Amino acid sequence: MDFFSTLLLVGLVGALLAYMNWRGQKGIRLPPGPTPLPLLGNLLQVDKQAPFKTFLEHSKSYGPVMTFYIGLQRIVVLVGHDTVKEALLDRADDFTDRAPIPFLHKVVKGYGLAISNGERWRQLRRFTLTTLRDFGMGRKRMEAWIQDESTHLIATLRDKNSALFDPTFIMSRAVSNVICALVFGRRFDYKDDNFLRLLETISVLIRFGSSPWGQLYNTFPWLMERLPGSHHAVYASVEKIRAFIREKIEKHQETLSPDCPRDYIDCFLIRLNKEKDLPSTEFTHDNMVATVLNLFFAGTETTSTTIRFALTLLIKYPHIQERVQLEIDTVIGRERCPNMEDRKSLPFTDAVIHEVQRVLDIVPLSLPRYATKNISFKGYTIPKDTVIIPLLHSVLRDDKQWKSPWSFNPDHFLDQNDNFKKSPAFMVFSAGKRSCVGESLARMELFLFLVTLLQRFTFTCPGGPDSLDISPELSSFASLPRKYQLIATPR
């Protein structure tokens, strides 16, 4: 038998074994789902632009807990507020671990906070939450940083002189500078070319991860690594961000004062030096680089994308923009700098910001979880090594939780007296033990930046509200709004 015949035989046997595995395991009641094909699984049935649409549609037939196969990987999808809540909150210990997502694993090389598990995750999450809070996350110190950054953002928009511009990187510079102040101890000038290149790299990486090409990489990473394509250039550009972070860490090491930490990197270095001889420590150089990378990525792209989408919706619905501005004018005026104390006096504005986040649905599939053991859930068994998707999209569109789930309606967050009201289904930051570590920072940034922008400018676009398409361009790993140009007219 020649080499190619042997290879073909091995492939067929592998596909047959995988197919037999798909059909179920003895003594295990898998959640129902569509019949998979050998090797490909249900890949051909999944909407490549928006996988959540496929899962939502199939839940009508198979219920709130379903089994899919993407390539050889078994995936269990959880649909609806009640099901996702039970998993992430009521059964948090069983649904804590992150899935080994090839796209993200390639970026962080298995280190850092975002996709780690076990002791590594526990040590890094506890340290990160404590350190960010110590440096003012969610407090007055951070509020002052955002207020200061707002002045740079406003000045940049005034310099546009009511001309058309793409807000993408202007917003990402402002938002990224806040996380840079926390992590690196400094902000960057908006005209800094190196800073802009880093932001462009982050944007390209997120777009790749949300594209069909990125989904293919996650499905067949071993194959994609051997095929030519743009993904190699994307990952090569990530190395430039790694080099940037390593350079900042080296400079911090040279000027480190253990009694006076300046930022997150200083605190990590101090802990690393303290535990360098401790075998069980996770405070290593590799974990530091990867965690800083996690914070830099997450602290830049998600919030800036939300602000950009908020401006789209406010242009699309000018009467809502006008009502927000009227509320801001009444409570704050047009000169005083907004602060977080103003939020309780701006219920409609607060409701609009929450509704923007709900409609954007920034991470529709959530970051997938992983079964590190067999899990009994709702009468089914989720076998060990199964990827679990808590479908956050289905929570943010659950018609049992939202009066008009498919419409932009700030009334979702207002009571009958027009006071702000919370919703248990507002899970844009996920929920439970793996909820976003930067949630309080993101909430503060969204409120202060958007109130400041609407206090000083009215936003329009040349074609008028009807010209805007608010459906996402891509919606897989992340929901990415379509790019557009707008006009910021000083008030």
Image (spheres, rainbow, N blue to C red):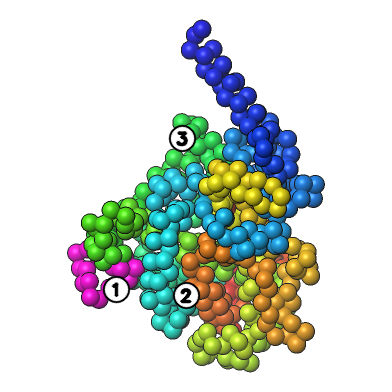
Residue identifier under label 1: 262
What is the residue that sits farthest to the left in this orientation?
254
Residue 57 in sight from this viewpoint: no
Secondary structure beneath disc 2? helix
Q: Residue furthest top?
A: 1
Badge 3 marks a residue whose secondary structure is: loop
Residue in view at x 37 percent, y 76 percent: 135
> If you read the primary sequence from the N terminus, does the residue marked by circle 1 or circle 3 appear first?
3
Q: Tell me the amino acid under the disc marked 2.
A: Leu
Do the residues under discs 2 and 3 have CB atoms within 8 angstroms? no
Of 474 and 272, nearer the camera is 272
Kindly report which numbered mark, 2 or 3, lies closer to the viewer in this rendering.
3
Q: Which mark is residue 225?
A: 3
Residue 261 on image: x %, y %: 28, 73
Q: Which mark is residue 153?
A: 2
At a point 31% along the width and 57% down the height, the residue shown is 281
Q: Nearer the viewer, residue 269 or 199?
A: 269
Verify whether residue 219 appears in magenta: no
**Magenta part of the chain:** 251-267
Residue type (three-letter) at the residue carrying disc 3: Glu
Q: Is residue 262 magenta?
A: yes
Q: What is the three-letter code of the residue carrying label 1?
A: Arg
The residue shown at (57%, 55%) is 95
Q: Within 10 angstroms of label 2, few (less than 14), some, or many (20 or more) residues?
A: many
| Relative to 390, 157 lies left or right | left
Instruction: Determine whether the residue tagged by mark 1 lies in a helix, strand or loop.
Output: loop
